[in-house]
Image: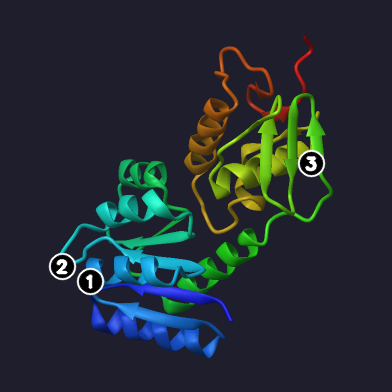
Amino acid sequence: MPQVLVIEDDVDVREAIGRLLTATGHEVRLCATALDGLREVAAREPDVVVLDLGLPDLDGAAVLSRIRLTSQVPIVVATAREAESEMIRLLRAGADDYVVKPYSAEQIEARIAAMLRRGRGPTAAGLVVGGLALDPQARTASLDGTALQLSRLEFDLLAYLMERAGTVVSRQQLLGDVWPESRSLETVDVHVTWLRRKLGERAAQPRYLHTVRGVGIRLSAPTQ
């Protein structure tokens, strides 16, 4: 049974989410404060965290950063802050998804289901492209024999592109297939940039990730 931790100070929202997730087969733990939520993550790491930003004792963005120091648990940030700059900041800080209030309990349940599907990872056989090697079952990747330290989303992005090596993949394809619960192409751009850094390259001097202007991204082995 998937375990979901909801960190939300609004009692009505918290209980509504809890009722729906329990009814749909989740084990739910509810916390009203940041400190209680952090204790729960440390004591029994959940499968997914739903994190409100407007908590009474500590800003949710700070909670996100603290969780990311020790855990890669999927985190869906729930907030009333709609600015795109805020969304980008939270994604950079380690959020996996972002939903703006007011939202329905059903919407949160759909986002959580997407996180859990993603957590199961790709099922393809081991992939090798040039010096890149990826094992979808073990969820490990390496470059020229050196292990890559990838976040879950970076790993999913790399696996998707390696499965389609040599093919140009549009940003819209990536958004729909790797981030089906998100609607922002900025999500794709941010994670492609992070993945480039992990691979030791820049958009201006690509080795593996090649931007095809106006079309999308192609992963291919270096020619030299």
| Mark nearer the N terminus (3 vs 1) | 1
**In the shown orientation, is residue 95 left or right of residue 101?**
right
Give the label, 3 or 1, closer to the camera.
1
* Residue 163 numbered mark, or none: 3
Q: Which structural element holds mark 3?
A: helix
Give the class, few, some or many, for how many residues have Cα within 10 Å of label 1's Cα (few <14, many ≥20): many
Residue 28: where, in percent of width, then height? Answer: 44, 82
Residue that appears at 49% across and 43% down: 187
Disc 3/disc 1 C-alpha distance (Å): 42 Å
Q: Answer with left or right where residue 14 lies relative to residue 149.
A: left
Which residue is depicted at the point 63% across and 59% down? 118
Residue placed under numbered mark 1 in the picture: 33
Specify the label residue 56 is tagged with. 2
Picture residue at 51% right of the left edge, 52% below the top: 183
Dot label at residue 14: none
- The x, y position of residue 98, in whole percent, is 41, 56
